[in-house]
Image (cartoon, rainbow, N blue to C red):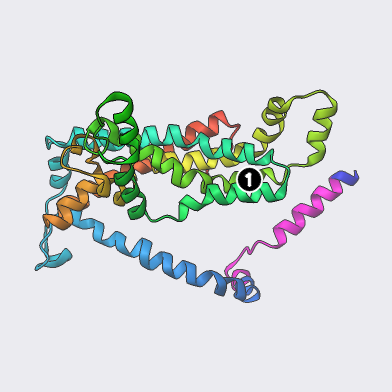
Amino acid sequence: MEAKALQNTIKANAGSTVPRSSGSLLNFVKKHYFLYLMLAPALILTLIFKYGPMYGAIIAFKDFSPIKGILGSEWVGFYNFNKFLSSPNFEVIFMNTLKLSFFGLILSFPVPILLALMLNQVRKSAIKKNIQLFLYAPNFISVVVVVGMLFIFLSPTGPINQLLTWATGEPVMFMSRPEYFRWIYILSDIWTSAGWASIIYVAALANVDPELHNAANLDGANLLQRIRHIDLPTIRPIMAIVFILAAGGIMSIGFEKAYLMQTATNLPTSEIIPTYVYKIGLQSGDYAYSAAVGLFNSLINVVLLITVNFIVKKLNEGDGLY
C-alpha cells in the first residue's frame, strides 16, 4: 500500500509540472524565463547556421545561375541527381567514400573503448594523468600539421623508408600508391582521435561502484571477467549511442584531410564525395550539380542513421538514439 501511494504521489507531482493549456504554458515560461534566456543563444545560432542554409539546398533541383539567383533559376527537377548517378565517376567515388568510412568505423570504434578499459585499471593517479595527456595530445594537432607529418615520415627519404631501404633495398611510395591511402588515412585518424574519444567512456567507468569489483574479487572473478560483467554493461548504452551516431555519419568523411593527402597518383582511392563536391562546386563553378551530390550524400546518412538505430534498438533491449 505504501509503495502504491508513493507511485501515485510521484505521478501527481510529475503531472503537475507539465503545462496543459496555453495559459499554463505561458505561466510556465514566465516562471522559468531565465532558463529559456540561457537556451536562446544556442537556439538562435542553430536556426541561423543550421536551418537557415537549408534554403539553399533547393539549387540542387534548379539550373542555378548566380545572376538569376536561387528563385530566378529554372527548375530542372532531379536532373542533377540523375547526372551524378549516371556519371562514370559515380561508382568509384561512392565506393571510395563507403569503404573509407566503413573500414574507418570498424577499426576505430573499439579503440577508445579498449583505451578506457585499460586506463580504468591504472590505480596511481599521477601515472594515469600522464598517460591521458599522452593519449589526448594528438587531438589538438592541426589536420594540416598531421598530413605534413605523414608526408615527411612516409616520404622516399623519410625515416620509415630509410629502415625499409636498409631491410629490403628499396623504398615504398606510401603517399603515391592508391592501395596505401586508406590504411594511412584510417591509422592516422585513430592516432589523433582515439584518445580524445575515450574520455566519455573513462567518465562512465568512473561511476562504477568499487564495491562491485571488491565483491567480484571475493567471488574469485579475474580481470577479464570483471570487465565483461561489470565495466562493459556500464558503458554499453554509451557505446550504442556513439556507434549509432558514427554509423549515421558514415558518409560524412572529413574533407580537409582527404584533400590534403591526395596526389595525382592515388586518386583512384582518395577521390571521395566531399573532395568531388569541392572540385565540382568551387573549382568548376557547377553549384547546382555539387549541391545535388552533397544532398544525395546527406540523404544516405539519414537512411543509415535510421537503419542502424533500428537494428541497435532490437539488439540492445530497446536502447537507442530515439
The percent coordinates of residue 12 (x first, y second) are 76, 56
Residue ID for mark 1: 202
Left/right of residue 243 with respect to residue 260 in the rendered view: right
Q: Which residues are magenta?
A: 4-26
The percent coordinates of residue 155 (x first, y second) are 27, 41
Residue at the image point whose x is 65% and y is 33% from the top: 232
Seen from the viewer's position, the closer of residues 182 and 131 is: 131
Image quarter of residue 52: bottom left
Seen from the viewer's position, the closer of residues 163 and 11 is: 163
Seen from the viewer's position, the closer of residues 204 and 86 is: 204
Left/right of residue 216 with respect to residue 199 in the rendered view: right
* Labels in figure, total: 1
Mark 1, secondary structure of its residue: helix
Residue 134 is a magenta residue? no
Residue at the image point whose x is 66% and y is 47% from the top: 128
Residue 12 is a magenta residue? yes
